[in-house]
Image: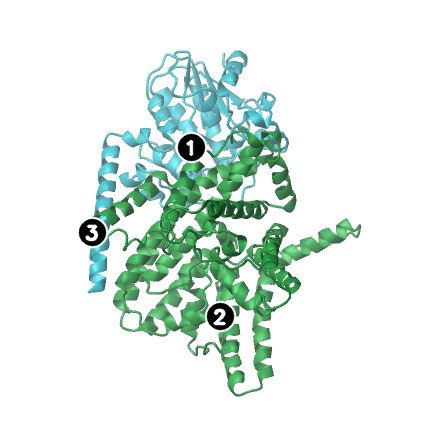
């Protein structure tokens, strides 16, 4: 009797929660509203922008540090930015670029603004589920996933549930700690594969690819110096990284909010525009 | 599998239904199933170490029977020898898995600093999850059997279920055998009131962990990574945030573990009693991690002479207990130092004989007196200073952090973690108003309307869904 009462009341209590969940997530799913409210909304914005026509002859792709310097929220006819977040990995950057060219856009130069640490992303992070799988694990993009990418996706728990509205429209992600041993200091296998594809894609569309580093804390200099440059050489990226490390602007730690992101990025946007993105 | 994960929810749902629907008529089958579920839970988290848990259980089970046999029939000396063997076995387990590498490194550093180069290498030892918790449960069992306060169980399943009881296996509370095992030896029909209370406690625990602790974790972790570049006021503020983070994290886990136990019909030890409303450190330690404190009091402090001895001896005993308490948390001098620091704070209380206080501040009143407010703030700040040592990776880092606090920028406005004010105020307000209860959602006497109660639960659930911070691992899992 007690148990029946307990179960009945628990179910009665839970029903409104489930209903609310279903209603809110369905509503958000149907009109894609979740793409402007969930964490990582900058990724959805970049995806939308990547499918739109633009007159800009310069395109910026990159991680959140690139997004700080060239926000993807800004409308600009000279420089268009799709820079969003490192968590989408190099494969996400490739897909954005692919969309952009497929939309019929012509660009002279593609600037990839990446913190040196973002190249390490091998879709092996806790963020991968929410920031990469949710926006990109769909039929539209699956044909472009290499075996390496598929293999990484398989390691993430519940990756097959990612398209369920209630999961897709929420910030929920399973706790995931990748236990793979890492035998690279700079370029992850996924980055190597997709940087290669980005190179080919740019060449095919007669665009020049330029890799630019974001400003770094002086404290990270030792770490940067310890990067094994052979990884660049042996994977055939010598040209792309020729001046990459030289261009790193080292700043005192006090200019960073968290050691990576600048407190006042606009000052450096001016520098980038003057020196490189011109 | 943490208690607030989907995996645990599914696991527990299955356990609950088998436990109360298929096995409800036979508590022995329930115990056996509980043991299997607990081993599955442990194996899921740490399969390699499951044999260690099983072997330790078997050893202590045999020791318990041996001690009792010799206590009644055989020579007393033999039961004492078996007890010593048991305690030594438990201590050796801890020493080997938790402290051996630390001892090797410490000795090596000591010799190196004396100019004697040593070529000692550390060993590759995996730390079994929850070892500090289950070892203490095992040790308390043989001690209690030897004292004669309880009969040893002849049923290995009952004993195994006590040692490995899954809700409390990884982070406590550390239940005493004389309180817990009798519950395993009688029928446990479904208890509606206990189950509802358990659900409420789980909800409150989830709120503390996911909303308070996880949101405070982000600024705390960020600032601790780069503390040398922060203003003094930011460092002070982050130390305060950490005090609330560790409290919400650990007490949140304890609440969830206790709640899950209640759902299964068990009444387990309370672990926290609003410690930040304490007026001195003695009161604080009677309200913080209570199951560990009482364990150390009963099995270390009192056997050493407790407080029925000279003041110098009392102080010595207190220092021993607190240093041990520190070391229990981990193999690092920071923990030992944190323990010793807390022991030192007892010195004035021992000298003034000012250790006993009424259990609740502002009893029967809405607001505390000015003197009580000052005492609570003072105690909180003393505890917070201790948490800096506790949080640091090394003693050098702890001193460095404190040194950076006292810069010219000490009186500036903290640059980071200001949103933490919101979470702290919410926590303090709720807990203050409900401090008369085991946990704040026990409000039967205050709120009669079920609608209003349900509305409060819905608000908490909504805040968990909307405000939950980035999930971080439970701080106490590492111990």
Name the subunit of mark 3: A
Q: Nearer the viewer, mark 2 or mark 1?
A: 2
> Is B89 situated above or below B106?
below
Please name the residue shown 39% across and 66% down the image: B36
Q: Are marks 1 and 3 in contact (CB under 8 Å)?
A: no
Reading the image, the residue beneath label 3 is A12
Reading the image, the residue beneath label 1 is A88
Name the subunit of mark 2: B
Q: Which chain is green?
A: B
Callout 3: few (<14), some (14-19), or many (20+) C-alpha neighbours within 10 Å?
few
In this view of the protein, which residue sits in the foreground, B64 or A187? B64
Q: Secondary structure at mark 3?
A: helix
Callout 1: few (<14), some (14-19), or many (20+) C-alpha neighbours within 10 Å?
many
Q: Are marks 2 and 1 in contact (CB under 8 Å)?
A: no
Horizontal and vertical percent position of residue B165: 41, 64
Q: Which mark is residue B57?
A: 2
In this view of the protein, which residue sits in the foreground, B253 or A225? B253
> Is B4 situated above or below B175?
above
Q: Secondary structure at mark 1?
A: helix
Q: Secondary structure at mark 2?
A: helix
Whether labels 1 and 3 share one chain: yes
């Amino acid at each position: 009797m007690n148990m029946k009462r307990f179960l009945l009341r628990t179910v009665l209590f839970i029903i409104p929660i489930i209903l609310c969940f279903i209603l809110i997530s369905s509503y958000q799913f149907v009109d894609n509203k979740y793409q402007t409210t969930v964490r990582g909304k900058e990724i959805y914005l970049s995806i939308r922008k990547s499918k739109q026509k633009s007159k800009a002859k310069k395109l910026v792709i990159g991680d959140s540090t690139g997004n700080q310097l060239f926000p993807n929220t800004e409308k600009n006819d000279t420089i268009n930015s799709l820079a969003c977040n490192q968590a989408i990995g190099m494969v996400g950057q490739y897909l954005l670029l692919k969309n952009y060219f497929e939309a019929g856009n012509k660009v002279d130069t593609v600037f990839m603004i990446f913190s040196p640490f973002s190249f390490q992303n091998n879709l092996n992070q806790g963020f991968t589920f929410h920031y990469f799988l949710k926006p990109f694990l769909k039929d539209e993009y699956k044909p472009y996933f290499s075996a390496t990418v598929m293999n990484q996706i398989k390691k993430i728990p519940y990756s097959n549930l990612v398209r369920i509205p209630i999961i897709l429209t929420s910030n929920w992600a399973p706790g995931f700690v990748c236990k793979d041993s890492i035998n690279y200091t700079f370029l992850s296998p996924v980055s190597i594969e997709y940087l290669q594809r980005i190179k080919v894609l740019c060449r095919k569309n007669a665009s020049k690819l330029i890799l630019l580093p974001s400003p770094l804390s002086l404290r990270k200099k030792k770490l940067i110096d310890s990067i094994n440059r052979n990884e660049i050489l042996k994977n055939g990226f010598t040209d792309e990284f020729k001046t990459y490390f030289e261009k790193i602007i080292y700043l005192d730690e006090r200019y960073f909010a968290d050691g990576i992101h600048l407190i006042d990025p606009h000052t450096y946007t001016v520098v980038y525009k003057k020196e490189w993105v011109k | 599998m943490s208690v607030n994960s989907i995996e645990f929810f599914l696991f527990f749902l299955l356990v609950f239904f088998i436990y109360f629907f298929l096995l409800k008529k036979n508590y022995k089958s329930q115990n056996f199933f509980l043991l299997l579920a607990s081993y599955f839970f442990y194996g899921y988290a740490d399969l390699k170490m499951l044999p260690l848990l099983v072997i330790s259980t078997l050893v202590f089970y045999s020791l318990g029977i041996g001690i009792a046999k010799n206590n009644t029939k055989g020579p007393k000396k033999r039961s004492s020898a078996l007890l010593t063997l048991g305690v030594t076995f438990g201590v050796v387990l801890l020493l080997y898995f938790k402290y051996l590498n630390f001892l090797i490194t410490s000795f090596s550093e000591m010799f190196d600093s004396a100019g004697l180069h040593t070529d000692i290498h550390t060993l590759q030892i995996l730390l079994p999850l929850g070892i500090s918790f289950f070892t203490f449960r095992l040790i308390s069992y043989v001690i209690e059997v030897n004292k004669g306060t309880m009969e040893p169980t002849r049923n290995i399943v009952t004993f195994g279920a006590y040692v490995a009881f899954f809700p409390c296996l990884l982070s406590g509370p550390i239940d005493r055998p004389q309180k817990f095992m009798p519950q395993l030896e009688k029928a446990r029909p479904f208890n509606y009131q206990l189950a509802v209370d358990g659900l409420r406690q789980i909800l409150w625990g989830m709120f503390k962990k996911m909303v308070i602790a996880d949101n405070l974790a982000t600024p705390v972790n960020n600032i601790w990574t780069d503390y040398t570049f922060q203003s003094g006021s930011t460092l002070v503020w982050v130390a305060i945030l950490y005090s609330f983070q560790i409290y919400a994290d650990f007490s949140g886990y304890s609440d969830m573990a206790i709640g899950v136990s209640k759902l299964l019909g068990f009444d387990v030890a309370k672990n926290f009693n609003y410690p930040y409303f304490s007026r001195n450190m003695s009161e604080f330690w009677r309200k913080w991690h209570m199951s560990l404190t009482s364990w150390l009091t009963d099995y270390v402090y009192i056997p050493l002479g407790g407080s029925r001895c000279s003041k110098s001896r009392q102080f010595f005993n207190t220092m021993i207990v607190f240093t041990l308490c520190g070391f229990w948390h981990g193999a690092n001098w920071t923990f030992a130092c944190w323990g010793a620091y807390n022991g030192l704070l007892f010195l004035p209380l021992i000298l003034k004989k000012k250790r006993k206080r009424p259990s609740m501040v502002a009893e029967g009143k809405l607001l505390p007196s000015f003197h009580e407010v000052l005492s609570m703030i003072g105690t909180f700040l003393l505890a917070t200073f201790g948490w800096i040592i506790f949080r640091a990776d090394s003693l050098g880092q702890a001193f460095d952090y404190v040194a950076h606090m006292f810069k010219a920028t000490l009186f500036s406005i903290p640059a980071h973690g200001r949103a933490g004010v919101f979470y702290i105020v919410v926590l303090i307000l709720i807990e203050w108003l409900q401090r008369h209860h085991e946990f704040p959602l026990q409000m039967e006497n205050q709120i009669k309307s079920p609608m209003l109660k349900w509305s409060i639960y819905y608000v908490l659930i909504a805040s968990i869904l909307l405000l939950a911070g980035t999930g971080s691992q439970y701080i106490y899992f590492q111990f």
